[in-house]
Image: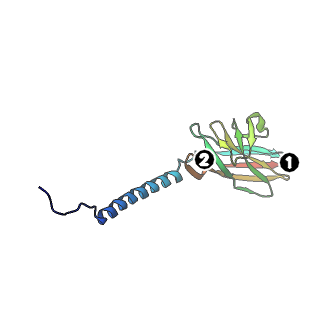
């Protein structure tokens, strides 16, 4: 028995529906991946305040953030906001292979002290801030913000101690 002349064809409507469903699934996947990439876990913070003092002209190094033991971050940069009653020099640094709270000799605690941009922040490393002034001063350092990449995830987040207060003493 034969059927007379009804050709089998996929309707244009079914093709449109199929491509719309595929497009919606691809878009949903892209949204989930984008959200995941833009929302890494927060970096550790604490309510601690570090206090330091140093004579004029002598730099002091204040530990602001110790790297987590389970993450390695590619650092894009570290932002430091400082408030002072006079001109001071403030520079964020990466203490490779060590950490410190306050010192004028970071070599005793750090294997290497480098600018953070482009470096890897690994377990055992820390972010420190160097403070130097040529006249007596009081400097308040706010919590640092670290710009980083962690795999496909990227963010700039606050990290470490809440603040540090540095007193530069006259000689």
**Residue 69 x %, y %:** 58, 36
Q: Residue at x 58, y 40 (%)?
A: 71
- Residue 68 in picture, x, y percent from top left: 59, 39
Q: How many residues crowd around disc 2 within 10 Å: few (fewer than 14), some, or many (20 or more)?
A: few
Q: In this view, does 75 lie above or below 108?
A: below
Which mark, residue 78? none
- Residue in the foreground of this view, choosing between 11 and 53: 11
Residue 102 location, quadrant: top right
How would you rate the neighbour count of disc 1 (Cα within 10 Å): few for under 14, some for 14-19, many for 20 or more? some
Q: Which residue lies furthest to the right in this view?
A: 171
Left or right: 170 with respect to 123? right
One can see residue 140 in this view:
yes
Closer to us: 114 or 25 = 25
Q: Can you give x and y, in whole percent of width and height, for residue 100 in the image?
A: 70, 38
Residue 11, quarter of the rendered image: bottom left
Q: How many marks?
A: 2
Of the pair 44 and 76, the residue shown nearer to us = 76
Q: Name the residue under label 2.
A: 47
Whether residue 64 is visible: no
Circle 1: element type: loop
Which residue appears at 36% of the width and 62% of the height? 20
Residue 157 relative to residue 92: left or right: left
Which label belongs to residue 57? 1
Residue 10 in the image: above or below residue 149: below
């Amino acid at each position: 028995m034969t059927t007379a002349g009804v050709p089998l064809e996929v309707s244009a409507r079914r093709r449109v529906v199929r491509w719309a469903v595929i497009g919606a699934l691809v878009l949903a996947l892209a949204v989930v991946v984008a959200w995941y990439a833009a929302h890494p876990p927060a970096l550790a913070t604490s309510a601690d305040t570090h206090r330091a003092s140093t004579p004029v002209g002598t730099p002091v190094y204040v530990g602001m953030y110790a790297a987590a033991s389970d993450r390695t971050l590619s650092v894009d940069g570290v932002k430091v906001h400082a408030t002072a009653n006079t001109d001071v020099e403030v520079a964020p640094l990466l203490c490779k292979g060590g950490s410190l709270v306050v010192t004028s000799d970071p070599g005793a605690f750090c294997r290497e002290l480098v600018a953070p941009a482009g470096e890897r922040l690994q377990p055992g490393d820390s972010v420190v801030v160097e403070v130097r002034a040529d006249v007596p001063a009081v400097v308040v350092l706010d919590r640092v913000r670290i710009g980083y990449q962690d795999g496909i995830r990227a963010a700039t987040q606050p990290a470490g101690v809440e603040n540090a207060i540095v007193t530069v003493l006259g000689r």
